[in-house]
Image (cartoon, grey):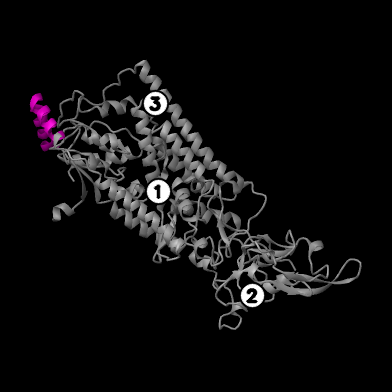
């Protein structure tokens, strides 16, 4: 630091004559004064302090990911978690194109990558209102992609048997979504609370009047998603998950046999499920009876 | 470029990576003459000339104001593009699209390439575009003209300098080689862990995203950095830590746009070095150090223009290599 001060005061310091020839070569360094030695030592300490601070911060951002127990639901077309995290550049272009604002960026305390996008399906699921999976088109690094590079392995059960048909586009010449892999699978995780299994109907706003989530209702407006709260239901037997599902043939209400042999109705998830999470969002029970298991593959 | 200039050019690259600037050993004939002339001027004349110069000195913030406006507008464009959905500049500073054209921050792109080990076309196009852009505009120009953290740090620096003046704090410099070490460490970390570790703590990315997508707790890290800079180390992040700065600095090696120093009128009072973010690039303005009568400032310079504004004699000016000869 005294080096800096010395040159800083260059204007008044006695200057040495300039010369076209090399000086006598690198002269032996004069012995350092006690004060300079101390300053150098302090500078080294500060340098270590900053090194530790910055590396500590960097590592603390990474460790929760390295030891993550729970998977997060990523936007459609996301690579497998590890590859997703390595390729995401955290620009949020997927956030910007989503018409229902389903995609959010993780914060410091979330512990799954500062600035990395995720979907909280219960709050706002991806309902493919954009028709073409805009987030995939927007992604500049291939974190979200239609065509996974060949060297990356496909999770067991992730591959779709067929391109999923989007109900909203069913009558279009090209009715499918170009998704090759699912981002998760819907599971009836709390069958005991499911209204259909209990034989109950549902009347009213699916998630109450305060719920901000949006959904595209083909009967209301093909192009504009509306608030779920503005679209009350009235059904004899609750089938909201089936009504809301944007993918053809992904879920239906079937007659199933309980362990005691009695018949009852139940939502059943089928192979075309892409894991978008609309069923989880619309499920009127609290907590949701049906949920998306992120990163899960299809099992017959 | 003559051999003496070339030597300085190489030295300045070393200085960017953390070497201390050294007193040059060789000078051009005309530089020797100019230095000699300055030494021969008698003291009283010199004092009179300096006093005269100070009297007629015009305080200007021209380049600073231009820069602040450009920086704020650029970041604002990101914000309004998303807020009003006008789709002019989508994304954040790490990666964006300007009316459809991919733009990808070089350091972020590098981190992703190292971590993911796979490069798709869009990533390549965006990186190439930005590379050409900053090749033309001077590498670290990104730092002072675009990076939102730079502006915050600039304001924090004002507080720091105020406290220094009041003798409440002192600047505690750090070894400049640390930035190169960080650059390597984060590159290796990205490659080994397969995660873009640096992106999680990049104040550029954090501030940019906070502006566009709303504030988050990650801003606490930025705040911690600013506090550190106010009370301990002047401009610590930009000077000693930021790998983005070094990446763009390397681009700046080849850039034609830079600040040029003219020896003749300089009184060597060092005002420029006091305002400079990277004073090691201005070692050439110290009396007796200029190797030629005109010297280009090295690649670590952020082209912020503070020295151009501050110089009372107009000895530091923006310059485009080759263009001045052409005109």
The magenta region covers B28-54
Q: Which residue is mark 2?
A: A162
Can residue B211 be seen at all in this image of the molecule? Answer: yes
| Above/below status of B72 relative to A140 | above
Residue A72 at x, y percent in the picture: 63, 56
- At 48% from the left and 65% from the top, the residue drawn is A138
Question: Residue A78 vs residue A32: left or right?
Answer: right
Proximity of marks 1 and 3: CB atoms separated by less than 8 Å = no
Indicate which disc residue B168 carries: 3
The secondary structure making up most of the magenta span is: helix
Mark closest to the chain's N terminus, 1 or 3: 1
* Front label number (2 vs 1): 1
Question: Residue B21 vs residue B83: left or right?
Answer: left
Residue at disc 3, secondary structure: loop
Gap between marks 2 and 1 measured at Cα? 46 Å
Image quarter of residue B229 = top left
Residue A231 at x, y percent in the picture: 65, 72
Q: Which residue is mark 1?
A: B148
């Amino acid at each position: 630091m005294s080096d800096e001060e010395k040159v800083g005061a260059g204007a008044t310091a006695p200057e040495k004559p300039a010369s076209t020839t090399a000086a006598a070569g690198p002269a032996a360094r004069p012995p350092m004064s006690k004060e300079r030695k101390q300053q150098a030592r302090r500078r080294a300490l500060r340098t270590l302090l900053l090194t530790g601070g910055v590396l500590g911060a960097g590592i603390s951002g990474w460790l929760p990911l390295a030891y993550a127990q729970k998977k997060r639901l990523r936007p459609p077309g996301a690579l497998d978690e590890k590859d997703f995290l390595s390729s995401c550049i955290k620009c949020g272009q997927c956030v910007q194109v989503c018409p229902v604002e389903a995609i959010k960026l993780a914060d410091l305390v979330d512990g799954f990558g500062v600035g990395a996008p995720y979907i909280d399906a219960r709050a706002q699921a991806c309902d493919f209102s954009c028709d073409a999976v805009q987030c995939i088109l927007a992604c500049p690094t291939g974190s979200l992609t239609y065509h996974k590079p060949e060297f990356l392995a496909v999770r067991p059960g992730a591959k779709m048997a067929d391109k999923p048909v989007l109900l909203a586009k069913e009558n279009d010449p090209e009715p499918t979504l170009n998704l090759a892999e699912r981002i998760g699978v819907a599971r009836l995780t709390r069958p005991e609370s499911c209204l259909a299994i209990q034989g109950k109907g549902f009347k009213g706003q699916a998630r109450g009047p305060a719920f901000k989530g949006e959904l595209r209702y083909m009967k209301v407006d093909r192009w504009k998603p509306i608030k779920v709260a503005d679209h009350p239901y009235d059904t004899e037997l609750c089938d909201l998950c089936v009504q809301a599902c944007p993918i053809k043939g992904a879920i239906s209400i079937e007659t199933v046999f309980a362990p005691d042999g009695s018949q009852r109705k139940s939502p059943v998830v089928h192979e075309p499920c892409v894991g978008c999470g609309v069923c989880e969002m619309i499920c009127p029970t609290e907590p949701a009876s049906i949920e998306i298991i992120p990163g899960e593959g299809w099992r017959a | 470029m003559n051999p003496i200039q070339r030597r300085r050019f190489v030295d300045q690259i070393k200085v960017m990576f953390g070497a201390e600037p050294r007193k040059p050993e060789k000078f051009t004939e005309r530089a020797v003459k100019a230095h000699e002339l300055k030494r021969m001027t008698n003291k009283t004349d010199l004092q009179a000339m300096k006093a005269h110069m100070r009297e007629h000195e015009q305080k200007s913030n021209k380049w600073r104001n231009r820069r602040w406006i450009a920086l704020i507008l650029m970041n604002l464009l990101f914000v309004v593009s998303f807020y009003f959905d006008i789709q002019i500049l989508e994304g954040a500073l790490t990666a964006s699209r300007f009316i459809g054209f991919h733009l990808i921050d070089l350091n972020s792109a590098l981190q992703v390439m190292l971590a993911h080990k796979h490069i798709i076309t869009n990533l390549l196009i965006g990186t190439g575009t930005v590379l050409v852009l900053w090749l033309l505009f001077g590498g670290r120009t990104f730092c002072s003209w675009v990076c939102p953290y730079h502006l915050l740090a600039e304001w924090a620096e004002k507080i720091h300098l105020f406290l220094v003046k009041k003798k409440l704090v002192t600047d505690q410099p750090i070894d400049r080689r640390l930035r190169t070490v960080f650059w390597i460490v984060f590159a290796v970390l990205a490659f080994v862990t397969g995660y873009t570790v640096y992106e999680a703590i990049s104040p550029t990315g954090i501030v940019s995203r906070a502006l566009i997508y709303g504030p988050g707790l990650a801003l606490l890290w930025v705040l911690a950095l600013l506090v550190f800079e106010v009370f301990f180390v002047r401009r610590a992040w930009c000077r000693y830590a930021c790998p983005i700065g070094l990446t763009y600095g390397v681009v700046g090696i080849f850039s034609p746009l830079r600040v040029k120093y003219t020896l003749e009128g300089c009184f060597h009072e060092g005002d420029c070095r006091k305002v400079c973010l990277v004073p090691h690039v201005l070692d050439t303005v110290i009396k007796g150090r200029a190797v030629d009568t005109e010297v280009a400032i090295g690649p670590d310079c952020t082209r912020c223009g503070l020295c151009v504004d501050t110089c009372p004699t107009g000895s530091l000016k923006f310059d485009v290599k080759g263009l001045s000869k052409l005109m």
